[in-house]
Image (cartoon, helix red, strand yellow):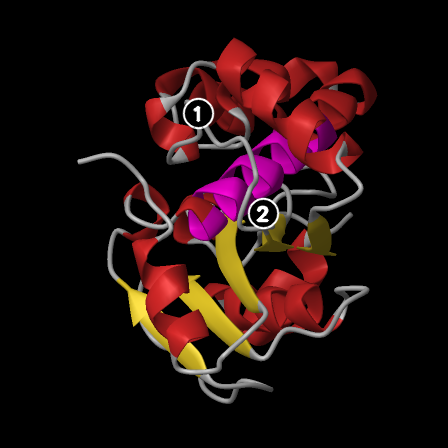
Amino acid sequence: MPCTFDAERRLQAAGQTPVAGIDEAGRGPLAGPVVAAAVILPADYPAEGLDDSKRLTAAARDRHYARLTRDASVVWAVAVLEAPEIDRLNILRATHEAMRRAVLGLRVPARHALIDGLPVHPFPLPQTALVGGDALSLSIAAASVIAKVTRDRLMAAHDRAWPAYGFAQHKGYATAAHLASLRAHGPCPIHRRSFSPVAQLAFPL
């Protein structure tokens, strides 16, 4: 089933406009930030091929990211919470905080949010949570692309700072190669020390 504007149109018909799609990237990795994006798409946005970022190739994600972020009619914002804040809040609360910051960062205030997954509480505006929403709503799909590409590029920069860990390849996820580098080198400053595979190997910076 392709992404559509159906959920957005239902809300707009009820007077809930503009509608922002919200999604995150990076809940599961052992290292790096969690990133949330909020996006308001115009009704006539040329969305052919736009989909859940996980169903797109890296090249397709980059193309959609460039189109979304360069189009002046698209309203978007991102929020980035780094590993120390994740460790302080826990990953669920950090993810929700990133979503709140992203929607509040929009240059045009949204009236309603379409959120991928489960409801977020507290939240600064009315919301509709859609499980699997990044594959259903074009606004959420746009947010998933912006969040994913933003995070991947941050992890590529971290790879240049800490090349021993291979962040550009695994983006901080718990691959066999990443776990091997953790055992060999211990955690670096962007590792999430509250995550058990890291905590077991942590030592003071």
Q: Is residue 28 above or below residue 114?
A: above
Which residue is at the front of the view, 78 or 108? 108
Q: Quadrant of the N terminus?
A: top left
Q: Secondary structure at mark 2?
A: loop
Identity of the residue furthest to the left in this view: 1
Disc 2 versus disc 1: nearer the observer: 1
Q: CA distance from mark 2 to mark 1?
A: 46 Å
How many numbered marks are there?
A: 2
Which residue is at the front of the view, 36 or 185? 36
Q: Is residue 90 above or below residue 158?
A: below
**Quadrant hosting residue 177:** top left
Which residue is at the front of the view, 27 or 100? 100
Q: Is residue 131 above or below residue 144?
A: below
Give percent across and percent down for residue 26. 51, 45
Q: From where the camera sits, is residue 143 visible?
A: yes
Q: Residue at x 50, y 58 (%)?
A: 21
User: Mark 1 or mark 2, which is nearer the start of the sequence?
Assistant: 1
Q: Residue at x 43, y 32 (%)?
A: 53
Query: Residue at label 1?
Result: 48
Query: Residue at label 2?
Result: 202
What is the chief secondary structure element of the magenta stretch? helix
Give percent across and percent down for residue 29. 47, 41
Give percent across and percent down for residue 187. 63, 38
Residue 178 within the segment the image draws in magenta: no
Stretch of the chain drawn in magenta: 139-154
Give percent across and percent down for residue 8. 41, 62
Q: Amino acid at mark 2?
A: Ala
Q: Residue at x 50, y 27 (%)?
A: 183
**Quadrant hosting residue 191:** top right
166 lies left or right of 56: right
Q: Residue at x 62, y 74 (%)?
A: 100
- How many residues crowd mark 2 within 10 Å: few (<14), some (14–19), many (20+)? some
